[in-house]
Amino acid sequence: MTQKDNWKIWEVFIRSKNGLSHKHAGSLHAPDAEMAIKNARDVYTRRNEGISIWVVESEAITASSPDDNDPLFAPADDKVYRHPTFYEIPDEVGHM
Amino acid sequence: MTKEMNLEERFQNYVDQENKIEPKDWMPEKYRKTLVRQISQHAHSEVVGMLPEANWITRAPSLRRKVALLAKVQDEAGHGLYLYSAAETLGADRADMVQDLLDGKAKYSSIFNYPTPTWADMGAIGWLVDGAAIANQVMLCRTSYGPYSRAMVRICKEESFHQRQGYEIMMTLAKGTAVQKKMAQDALNRWWWPALMMFGPTDDESPNSAQSMKWKIKRKSNDELRQEFIDKTVPQAEYLGLTIPDEHLKWNEETGHYDFGPIDWEEFYNVIKGNGPCNKQRLGARQKAHKEGEWVREAANAYANKQAERARKEKGAA
Ligand SMILES: [Fe+2]
Ligand SMILES: [Fe+2]
């Protein structure tokens, strides 16, 4: 009997070393979380790329839509006062 | 209609400014289709590409060579997986892609339909076949589709050891006994022309190339890549003291490139059509592996279902 494997897609996140955040490495197929971790270890950490793996079902991720990029991100464009260089502090004060 | 045109213009503009396209961005249907075809073919090539070398793992001449070859072949499996994932981001279904390969409906690089009768073929493959693949993949690191580009960056990082281990094998043989050197030369003779064919038909014979270049899926033409590869490889062959099997091969002072003889495109199309020396054998090996792995996939599914069921019950009881 042949059936489509109906394995879920998992997104893989890897922490390369302690002190750094997990970073998205890619995705893979697996029937469950346990196998997803095992596959992620073989697929994404063959060269000491990580010391910790997270796997998340792709379906569980909600993403912002590229169509909303303007309303979401444009408002930050004109807020220069959120950056340190906006403020004038004389050099004599020293590094601040 | 005009709205569609506007979208396409905007898309082209966005690409022209060297922006990467991401899965949820609007893209022309033909861009998506071209990528799904190209990426899935690329994935199949990585997977089928394991076969000619796997043939030699158990017969490697030393443990050092064996672990290297094993690691290389395992990398190729990984490359196939990265690429199937990239194709999935475009809405392609992995099971369908795999099925197309098994049914003989999908293409993969014709180079893998050549046999590997001697150990020297492991050297020639790493040096020439991975070398040619690298030239193509380095270019694809800058492809306009984000997930494909990222897969390529990862792949390129892993590829350079593939070529080096191959060249090291060639070096050992070329500096060995007369018989070993002859073996290396024989492998070069057999792999040289098929390796040049890996870059695909000449520019005037590849009609879809222009659109791919415009969309920045491809960044260099087939002929450009082929020439680069030849220019880079000729000195490497000279270093080995081996002769490239092309009587027309000659440095051209004016162009600053090597001139080379005509490629037998009839052979190329013939192998693509399925008449290469190993097409049937390769496909047969894939089908057999897939069939023999079926019980593993089924067992994994059964286990996953049982665990999920148990978790549901425990939750219900609590
Ligand atoms: Fe590869
Ligand atoms: Fe490779």
Image: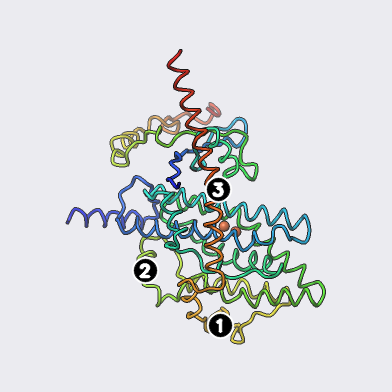
Q: Secondary structure at mark 2?
A: loop
Chain containing mark 1:
B
- Labels in figure, total: 3
Q: CA distance from mark 1 to mark 3?
A: 48 Å
What amino acid is at disc 2? Asn
Q: Report the residue marked by disc 2.
A: B208
Dividing the picture into quadrants, the one containing residue A68 is: top left
Vertical order, B224 against A52 (above or below): below
* Closer to us: B311 or A62: B311
**Percent from the top left, x then y, of residue B126?**
64, 64
Of marks 3 and 2, which one's residue comes earlier in the chain? 2
Left or right placement of residue B309 versus residue B230 in this view: left
What chain does mark 3 sit on? Answer: B
| Name of the residue lying farthest toward the top | B318
Q: Chain of mark 2?
A: B
Q: Amino acid at mark 3?
A: Gly
Q: CA distance from mark 3 to mark 2?
A: 37 Å
Q: Which residue is disc 1 drawn over?
A: B259
On residue B293, the disc is 3
Task: Residue at 35% x, 55% y: name it.
Answer: B32
* Dot 2 or dot 1, earlier in sequence: 2
Q: Are both tags, 2 and 1, on one chain?
A: yes
**Labels 1 and 3: the sequence-earlier one:** 1
* Residue at the image position 44 percent from the left and 54 percent from the top: B99
Between marks 3 and 2 in the image, the one whose residue lies nearer the viewer = 3
Q: Say which element carries label 1.
A: strand
Mark 3: secondary structure: loop
Q: Do labels 3 and 2 touch, CB within 8 Å? A: no
Percent from the top left, x then y, of residue A93? 53, 26
Q: Are marks 1 and 3 in contact (CB under 8 Å)?
A: no
